[in-house]
Amino acid sequence: MSSNETGSPFAPHTDAETAAMLDAVGVAGEEELFDIPETVRFDDEFGIEARSERAVRAHLGSLLGRNDDLTEFLGRGHYDHYVPSVVDHLADRSEFLTSYTQYQPEVAQGFLQALFEYQSMLVELTGLDVANCSMYDAATALGEAATLAARVRAASGDVVLVPDLLHENRRSTLENYVAGADLTVESYPTDDANADVEAVADRMDDDAVMLYAESPTVRGTIEERLSALGDLAADHDDGRIQYDGHRTHVAAFLRQVPGRLVGAAEDGDGRRAYTLTLQTREQHIRKERATSNICTNQAWVALRTAMHVAQLGPDGLVDLAEECVVGARELATRVDDVTGIRAPVHDRHHFREFVARTDQPAPAVAADLEGEGFALHAIDDHLLQICTTEANAAHWDALVEALGVVA
């Protein structure tokens, strides 16, 4: 039906057609299709006056102009890196922005190939047997891993073990995920911001369904005994789930992996083709068959990541990683020279960020630094966390000078 007949290109039904549909379901109007309790029904006005586009832009510019212009040395899960302009230029193409899940491979080969390349990059970088795509973020990926472990477990274990330093927001998300899976979350101790492997070994028993470790940790330390933790998980596995390179175990759980998996095949003419594999669409959209809470497609984020990694190349990735290690070490050395501050607190190798101990109360130091134009995390009464990347490296001198004034 044309827009001339309906008055709108987005509502393709005439008044007569709408009336016929309402009559068929036995209601007098569209509002009867919605059961909104009176206690939450909004029948007032929003109080937003109509403005022209120019007036709206001016108003928003005025509001945003009130934000503090701070140089950020924040981290703890969110990092400011330079993203090459090619990523924005390519990823902002309309066919990428408007793409939904690629259920129809015959019209989505380009995006499917991009996701296949993304998965291949992660497999090569991490050594994993398989990598999925379309997860939301690290916190929800952790939650999805826990519910996956619950689905494939062969024993009665119901405890997810996580480090005691796990970011509070990440733990909160995990607890939300496992609440409906009859799982509980418990902490294992850390030693100087790395896992206390001996304590973990003492805690690993039949009630543990998953062991989680991260590197770098939330405090920027590089976990030095990941292999030992992996061995502990493997030693206590009785067919439930392994992440230690056993292909037969991993393959058995592929159909339970959340998100999407893109596979390479051949079309009818023998040409290479890509398609979502090992999962049906119902596995994503039907509650009774769903393997996860992943629904809205996050492929665009994976696409941007693949573009960024491809632009950097193997040498560029290594160079960036080295900058993240060397930069944290060099800035920590300079901060340690400031009277009243010791850095780093943890005698470990660090990646991007580190913790510094202050003689003065850390929240007060952070507040004073904000007045000097810098944003840092105060994570305890006398602990500051400082994150550096290529995005703020030019401001080291000014930060160290400001620390000398406020500390």
Image: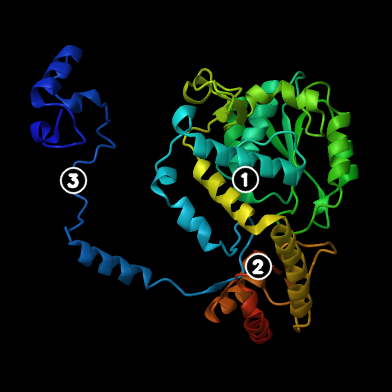
| 192 up-or-down from 25: above or below | below
Which element carries disc 3, helix, strand or loop? loop
Instruction: Report x, y in % for residue 156.
Output: 75, 20
- Nearer to me, 384 or 213: 213
Residue farthest to the front, as pictured? 269
Residue at x 50%, y 45% (from the top left corner): 300
Can you see residue 163?
no
Instruction: Report x, y in % for residue 290.
Output: 54, 23
* Quadrant placement of the C terminus: bottom right
The residue that disc 2 covers is 389
| 344 up-or-down from 203: above or below | below
The residue that disc 1 covers is 138
Q: Would you say the residues marked 2 and 1 are in contact, meaning their CB atoms lie under 8 Å apart?
A: no
- Nearer to me, 397 or 252: 252
| 235 up-or-down from 56: above or below | above
Residue at x 55%, y 82% (from the top left corner): 372
